[in-house]
Image: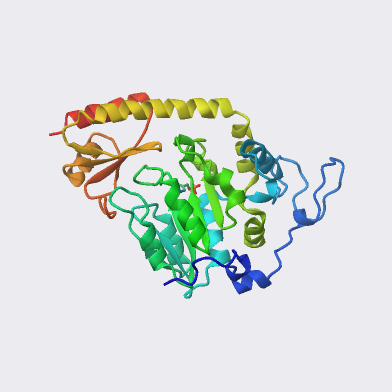
């Protein structure tokens, strides 16, 4: 039974890999000098001097973007780290805290496949603890499986592919009992009725919350992932972050979108209305046996024969995600909420399947 269980006080030094603890971060030219004044001569970074808007390296600290996020989320800039998608943020977390071929992490299938991929890439054992049949966390089993080498527990809420937000009380138990880091992936939080865990960061020194501009913000192509955590944790991740991991075009597009929050919220509201429409219509489709409750922009449904229905939909030009290979997800399809005409096309196709 786990020695990584409480309750000595949380000690980040016990979690950081030695090589990371001992290293100094790379200091880029723009780290050493960045000025707001326009009339400086910059001949420190071997850039091309001819101005085309992109000839200079981007701000390695993404100050402008972080400032807006910091205001929106009412959190200190020091508690924000940005990455090339949340996938990069998750990878940095592995590399900072998990010693290859020694440490392990816990994930809870059915869930986002990337945690397992990153574990494998980093040579970290991935202990699967299945969600319960109602897709809630099996807290006892998770705590049972924790050992001295367990560094991270990944929680996806709302969970992909099931769509539900995970019960707060169960997550609180893990945050309180586990002496490693609990990562809560909130890629879909903007669609959820439940509140973000970002507001509880001050209560839990071992909490990391990740978010992304890829879903509700409609910017999957620019690759911007966000990590919120204590300054202590963010400082560790900053040490190993590639200096220019968020490019200039991405920072510009993110800033632009973050200045249009009314538009973002309107799109979210519209997607939520379409989700309700879909749930109501899906209930009348005979091949659908169950519609799982969704707090996200997709709906998981159980059908009579997922492989058959998948192919039939494909033949009508509709691509859905067959999740049947995931545990607890026999014969399920995951349907992303689309535009109204797309949703109608889907419903129409489903109703006509034989
Ligand atoms: C889509 C998704 C992400 C987003 O990853 P990005 O790299 O930011 O695009 C993260 N986590 C989950 C669970 C997702 O479904």
Q: Splitting the image into 4 quarters, where does residue 70 fall?
A: top right
Q: Does any portion of residue 62 appear in the rendered image? A: no
Q: How is the image coloured?
A: rainbow
Task: Report x, y in % for residue 76.
Answer: 68, 45
Horizontal side of 271 relative to 53 (left or right) equals left
Task: Report x, y in % for residue 48.
Answer: 75, 50
Task: Report x, y in % for residue 192.
Answer: 44, 36
Report the number of numbered marks.
0
Q: Is residue 344 above or below residue 47?
A: above
The one nearer the camera, 313 or 44, is 313
Horizontal side of 245 relative to 136 (left or right) equals right
Residue under the image location 23 percent in, 34 percent down: 316
Residue under the image location 45 percent in, 41 percent down: 188
The one nearer the camera, 157 or 324, is 157
The one nearer the camera, 330 or 182, is 182
Q: Residue furthest front?
A: 7
Q: Is residue 322 above or below residue 235?
A: above
Q: Quadrant of the N terminus?
A: bottom left
Task: Report x, y in % for residue 8.
Answer: 57, 67
Q: Splitting the image into 4 quarters, where does residue 24 fall?
A: bottom right
Q: Splitting the image into 4 quarters, where does residue 22 fall?
A: bottom right
Horizontal side of 200 relative to 194 (left or right) equals right
Horizontal side of 96 relative to 295 (left or right) equals right
Q: Does any portion of residue 212 appear in the rendered image? A: yes
Q: Quadrant of the C terminus?
A: top left
Residue under the image location 76 percent in, 53 percent down: 30
């Amino acid at each position: 039974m786990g020695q990584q269980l409480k309750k000595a006080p949380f000690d980040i030094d016990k979690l950081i890999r030695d090589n990371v603890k001992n290293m100094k971060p790379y200091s880029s030219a723009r780290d050493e000098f960045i000025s707001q004044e326009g009339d400086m001569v910059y001949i420190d970074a071997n850039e091309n001097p001819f101005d085309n808007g992109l000839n200079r390296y981007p701000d390695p600290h993404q100050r402008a973007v972080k400032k807006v996020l910091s205001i929106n989320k009412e959190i200190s800039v020091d508690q924000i780290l940005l990455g090339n998608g949340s996938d990069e943020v998750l990878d940095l977390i592995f590399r900072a805290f998990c010693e290859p071929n020694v440490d392990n992490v816990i994930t809870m299938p059915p869930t986002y496949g990337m945690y397992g991929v990153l574990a494998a890439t980093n040579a970290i054992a991935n202990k699967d603890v299945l969600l319960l049949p109602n897709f809630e966390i099996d807290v006892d089993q998770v705590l049972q499986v924790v050992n001295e080498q367990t560094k991270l527990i990944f929680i996806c809420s709302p969970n992909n592919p099931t769509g539900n937000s995970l019960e707060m009380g169960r997550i609180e138990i893990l945050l309180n009992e586990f002496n490693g880091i609990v990562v809560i992936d909130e890629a879909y939080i903007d669609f959820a009725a439940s509140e973000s865990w970002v507001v509880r960061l001050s209560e839990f020194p071992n909490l990391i919350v990740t978010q992304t501009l890829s879903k509700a913000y409609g910017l999957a192509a620019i690759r911007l992932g966000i990590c919120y955590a204590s300054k202590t944790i963010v400082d560790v991740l900053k040490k190993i972050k590639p200096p220019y991991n968020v490019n200039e075009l991405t920072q510009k597009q993110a800033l632009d979108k973050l200045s249009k929050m009314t538009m973002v919220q309107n799109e979210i509201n519209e997607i939520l209305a379409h989700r309700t429409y879909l749930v109501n219509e899906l209930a009348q489709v005979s091949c659908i046996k169950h519609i799982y409750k969704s707090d996200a922009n997709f709906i998981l449904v159980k059908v009579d024969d997922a492989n058959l229905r998948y192919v039939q939909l494909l033949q009508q030009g509709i691509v859905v995600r067959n999740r049947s290979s995931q545990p607890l997800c026999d014969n399920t399809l995951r349907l992303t909420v689309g535009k109204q005409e797309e949703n109608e096309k889907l419903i129409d196709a489903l109703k006509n399947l034989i």
